[in-house]
Each structure stands twice: as C-alpha cells, then as structure tokens.
Image: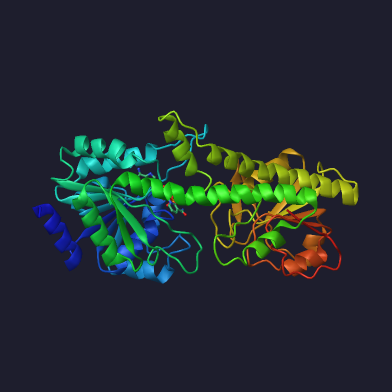
Amino acid sequence: MSNIKQELLSKIESKELVVGVIGLGYVGLPLAVEKANVGYKVIGFDVLPEKVKLVNEGHNYIGDVVDEELAELVSKGVLRATDNFEEVASCDFIAIAVPTPLDEYQQPDISYVEKSTKDVAKYLKKGSIVVLESTTYPGTTEELMLPLLEEGSGLKCGEDFFLAFSPERVDPGNKIYKTKNTPKVVGGVGDDSTEVAAALYRNVLEGEVFTVSSPKIAEMEKILENTYRNVNIGLINEFALIANKMGINIWEVVDAAKTKPYGFQAFYPGPGIGGHCIPLDPFYLTWKAKEYDSHMRIIEASGSVNDFMPEWVIERSMKILSKNFKKALNGAKVLLLGVAYKNDIDDLRDSPALVVYDYFNKEGADLSYYDGYNPSFKYGDVEINSLKEITPEVISSYDLVVITTNHSNVDYQMVVDNAKYVFDTKYATKDVKNNKDNIELL
Ligand SMILES: NC(=O)c1ccc[n+]([C@@H]2O[C@H](COP(=O)([O-])OP(=O)(O)OC[C@H]3O[C@@H](n4cnc5c(N)ncnc54)[C@H](O)[C@@H]3O)[C@@H](O)[C@H]2O)c1
C-alpha cells in the first residue's frame, strides 16, 4: 500500500484529517458542518467575504443547516472560514462545491470549477486528496481538473495526491433526506483515490457509500439522476397541456396513476422548472454530446416543453381575465403567490415564478407578489418587495391571484374565499372547499 494512501486512511480513522471545503453555498456549508460534526477540523473557503464573515461569526444562512449546530462548531474552533487559499496547504481532504451554471447561450459555464481548481493547485500539498462535488459533464475531473492540478502543483496524481468525483445529492428543504443520510457515489482516478474518498465519506455519513470504477461514471450517473427528473417533469407538463384542452384534471390523473405500486413514479406539472440543478444539469450532457456528433433529443424536447410553461401561465391568465371579467391583462391587478422555485424554501435560482413575473410585467399587468420565504428579489436593477401580509382585504383587491409556488405557510382557504379568481399552477388548493367556482388549475 502506498505511503500516502496509508497516511490518509489512518488520519481519516483517527480524525486527525483537516478538511477543506471550497464554496460555502447550499451544498458546501452542509458538507462542512457534517464533517466538523464527526470530529474533523474543517476550513471552509469562499470568494465572498460576507459568507466568510457570517460563518466565522457562527451565523447560518442555509436552510438545511441547524443554526445552533453551526454556532457551536465555530465556537469550539472545529469549523472556520477563509477567503485565503494559501490555507489549502494545511488541508488533507479538499472538497470542491462551486457553482456550475449555464451561460447566456445555455452552454456550461465551467469557469468556477476551473478557477477553484487552479487556486487549489497552487497550494496543494503532497499526500492530500481533492474531490469535486459540483454537478458537471462526464470528463470534467480527468480532462479538466487532473492536468490543472498536476501542472499547478508539480505533483503527480496517484503518486503524490489523489483525485475523485463524488456528486452531491442534497435536496434543499427535504425533511427526511439530508446530506448526512443520503447515499453517496464515489469514482476516483484510480482505485486508491476511490478508496480514500470512500473511506472519508463512510466516516462522515450514515447513508451507503457506493463506489464506481471511474470519475466519468459518477459524473454521468449524477446527470442521469437529474435528467430523469427533468424529462419526467417535461412529460407531465406536456400531459398537462393536452389534459387542459381535453377538459381533464391532470392532478387527479396523477393521483390515480400513482396508486400503481410499481413501475410509476409521480411527477407534477407546474409553471416551469427551477433551481440550480434540474433545469441546467442535463444541458451539460447535451453540450458534451456534441463532441461525439450526437444530439440528446429527449433532453432537448423536454427542455422546450418546460421552457414553454411560463408562457402557458400567461396565456391562461389572459383567457381567465377575458372570459370571466372581460378584462385585458394589461392594467389588470395580479398577485403572484410564491416566487421560490419550490415550496418552503428561500431559493430563487432559475425560479419559473420569476419568469412568469417578467412576462406579466411586460404585458402591463399591475403586479404584486407575496412570499413569506423571500421578502424581496432583484428584477434587473430594481428591488421588488413582497407584500407584508395577505389579508382577506388584500386578496379581494386583485383581479387575479396566481399561485406559482405551493408554500405551506399560506392559508389557501382564505385566499380562495376572498379572491375574485385564482389560477393555481401547483394544486395548492387541493384541499380547499370552493363554493364560488373561482379556481382554475394548470
Ligand atoms: N443546490 C442544490 O440543491 C444542489 C444539489 C446537488 C448538487 N448541486 C451542485 O453543487 C454545486 C454547488 O451548488 P450550490 O447550490 O451549493 O451553489 P451556491 O451558489 O449556493 O454555492 C457555491 C458557493 O461557491 C462560492 N464560490 C464561487 N467561486 C468560488 C471559488 N473560485 N472559490 C471558492 N468559492 C467559490 C460562491 O461564492 C458560493 O458561496 C453545483 O455544481 C450544483 O449543481 C447543487
């Protein structure tokens, strides 16, 4: 057994290992906390000084992290943050969890992974391991990171340091599955890299650690997971479009279909798809596929259905106003309920509700929103503020209330009882008693 592997494995076992987490966002901060919780010394790195400051003051800013837990780890000195990458030199295990967005042409923007890898390479010490956790196209670890790390550090992978890919699967807001108890997949550059990375995760997590034969397998399986969601949402959105034309309640259809105990998983339609993962990740693969003269036809088709959904919300809203009130959308008072991309979280990234907001605004609607999780958001350079509260008087003052996120902290019975009309794109009104016949579902 190589010396550096042996050393790392015994540091993992004895908890002497120093862990560096690069990127302290929705993924990185919970990762840092979990590792510190089991006794490793953790240094978090971020380019945003305000995040570094918050962590060092013990202030939490991520929904899935417990405030008191973070504060205690910081006060005990086991977790701290910095924007000084020289400190990478004291880390044995470096996890990278930086953003992997798309650019304006829907192409992968891999610049965050590239920059952070170069920063790590400068200070990488012999006998350490680097693990990428960001979602990305198959090939990133070996084709992009490996040469950057070797050139930048002068060290050799497999002899002087190890390198692996292990995708993060956190589902923000999920009450049952957190970073700690979600199974983890690991694929290293060579068996030693896989073994060391898997050993660390087995020490930290309760979920199964499943090893695969290469980083590419791990990279592609993560894209497969997210593509599976993306195309199934695209499929049900397409069903929703035709069901509406046929006068069929799609939500009742899904509720009926999901009684089948095998071979069917329920997905739900909505005003589009959002978040930093599901709308973007499949397009990392469509981009890479072009290198192989291939098109990912199902991903493209699903993307076009999902991207159409916000337009459909506007079209339906126009029809509702015209049919029921002989009103145009231009000048109508419209209230959007919820701007987060999913229920009970504060994450606005790629939220379809914001696309809907933009379309309504461009059509000249007199627009407001209410979202108890998101008191404000930036619309271009303008700060838009949520209504402070929604009372019967407030609700009744709008021509149309559009439910764009099904947050559970809204009294939907009150909304329906007082609204002139409700367009529910999320089936939030499922359990509401409606005597006024003033609801339309997506
Ligand atoms: N959010 C999720 O639900 C989720 C789930 C699974 C996987 N992922 C993947 O995890 C990765 C990170 O996502 P996220 O949601 O945590 O993003 P995020 O934007 O919440 O956090 C990323 C952090 O990295 C920091 N950062 C950017 N460049 C940096 C650099 N060069 N060095 C150090 N820090 C840097 C940012 O300031 C930010 O704090 C993405 O690839 C994403 O696809 C996200």
Q: Going by the image, does 15 lie left or right of 186?
A: left
Q: Is residue 110 visible?
A: yes
Q: Going by the image, does 125 lie left or right of 203?
A: left
Q: Going by the image, does 309 lie left or right of 224?
A: right
Of residues 58 and 311, the one nearer the viewer is: 311
Of residues 51 and 162, the one nearer the viewer is: 162
Of residues 100 and 202, the one nearer the viewer is: 202
Q: Is residue 275 visible?
A: no
For residue 408, above or below residue 105: below
Residue drawn where x is 82% and y is 65% of the image:
418
For residue 139, above or below residue 278: above
Q: Going by the image, does 50 lie left or right of 174?
A: left
Residue 208 in picture, x, y percent from top left = 34, 65
For residue 11, above or below residue 24: below
Residue drawn where x is 30% and y is 59% of the image:
80
Of residues 293 and 340, the one nearer the viewer is: 293
Number of marks: 0
Residue 66 in picture, x, y percent from top left = 43, 68
Residue 438 in picture, x, y percent from top left = 83, 60
Quadrant where the N terminus sits is: bottom left
Residue 308 in picture, x, y percent from top left = 66, 41
Residue drawn where x is 37% and y is 52% of the image:
167
Q: Find residue 12 and report its image quarter.
A: bottom left
Colouring used for the render: rainbow
